[in-house]
Amino acid sequence: MLDGKKSLFSGMQATGTITLGNYLGALKNWVEIEDEYMCFYGVVDMHSITVRQDPKLLRKNARNLLMLYIAAGLDPEKNCIYYQSHVSAHAELGWILNCFTYMGEMNRMTQFKDKAAKHADNINCGLFTYPILMAADILLFQSDVVPVGIDQRQHLEICRDIAIRFNNIYGDVFTIPEAYVGKTGAKIMSLQEPTKKMSKSDTNPNAHILLLDEPAVIMKKFKRAVTDSEGRIAYNEDQPGIHNLIDIYCATTKSSVESALAEFDGLGYGALKQRVGEAVVAELEPVQKKFYDLSKNKDYIDQIIKNNGEKAAYYAGKTLRKVQRKVGFPDRIR
Ligand code: TRP
């Protein structure tokens, strides 16, 4: 809770362009809760450097992501959209929480194991304590809920454990966050391996639709989407490719599975892919247009970055000072 209103934090990494999966699974749904919660959406650039980044590219991707948040429909007056690295309280609370988290707990994190295997030449301490920084993100804003996908559930769980531990020692300092269970935040799978999540880090470009892909590219990727040899359009686990195409269609057009199946009745796979591709193109066109308009409006974006950064710092600072006092740091002299 912040100022008597329920609050929420979520964020995305500023690496590469986000995918249709990020959009349908998260962003598109965030737009609908802006009146219900005080929302904070970070471009979590501090998390991004747990993996080596090209500085120029990181800066560009971070700005693009911030603009994509807005282009996707998040109103920057209502939602606090900002760079994590502009609010030093993230690092400061992150450090304190480091001292309230056990090595054993971090050792159990499955995402760390996956990432360590992927980046064997750079298993740095930041990668190890990544979930603690994430806990700081969430707890700084006294978040009641956190919209996260299934792959981040374990991180949210550890955040809760840390918060409960801290509260047990020092009293009610942190709100204990819950996972936000939205109205079907769709889980979108790879177009090439439909049993795997769609990921922007997939090395096969046909596996994902990027939010800034041009219409012709989107259509081509759908045309190449992996299906099966059943030859009939049904919605079941045995046909993960078709299942995924239907999920994409439903999330994009907000139709129910039943009505989508009725619409697709009698179609071949080629025609299905065409329909889904067209729906995605129609959905992304206005987002892309808005993105390119925003890109031309440097002053406007800069103003948002400044104002929202200050707003986030204000609320985060309140929590941080409370925590600092609780752990026994000396008061500042004014
Ligand atoms: N780890 C998240 C991801 O990669 C991003 C993230 C950072 C986040 N801090 C967060 C998500 C806090 C939710 C809440 O997807």
Image (spheres, helix red, strand yellow):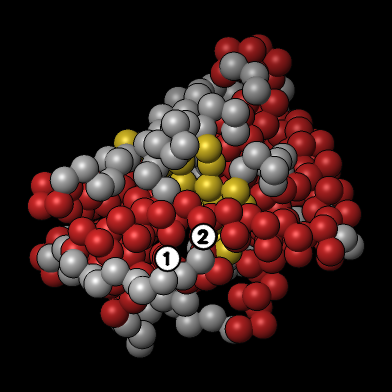
From the viewer's perspective, is 2 left or right of 294?
left
Q: Is residue 121 above or below residue 4?
A: below
| Spot occupied by residue 248 in the image (x, y as percentages of width and height) | 61, 34
Q: Residue at x 63, y 35 (%)?
A: 31
From the viewer's perspective, is 145 left or right of 95?
right
Q: Give the structural element (helix, strand or loop) at label 2.
A: helix
Which of 215 and 266 lies nearest the eye of the viewer? 215
Q: Residue at x 55, y 69 (%)?
A: 86
Q: Can residue 45 be spotted in the picture?
A: no
Q: Residue furthest front?
A: 334
Q: Amino acid at mark 2?
A: Ala
Q: Residue furthest bottom?
A: 121
Q: Can residue 212 be spotted in the picture?
A: yes
Label 2 – label 1 distance at C-alpha: 7 Å
Q: Give the structural element (helix, strand or loop) at label 1.
A: helix
Q: Are marks 2 and 1 in contact (CB under 8 Å)?
A: yes
Residue under pointer 1: 89
Q: Amino acid at mark 1?
A: Ala
Q: Residue at x 86, y 49 (%)?
A: 289
Residue under pointer 2: 313
Density class for disc 2 (Cα within 10 Å; few <14, some 14-19, many ≥20) is many
| Spot occupied by residue 240 in the image (x, y as percentages of width and height) | 48, 36
Question: Which quadrant: the C terminus?
Answer: bottom left
Density class for disc 1 (Cα within 10 Å; few <14, some 14-19, many ≥20) is many
Q: Residue at x 60, y 28 (%)?
A: 35
Which of 211 and 316 lies nearest the eye of the viewer? 316
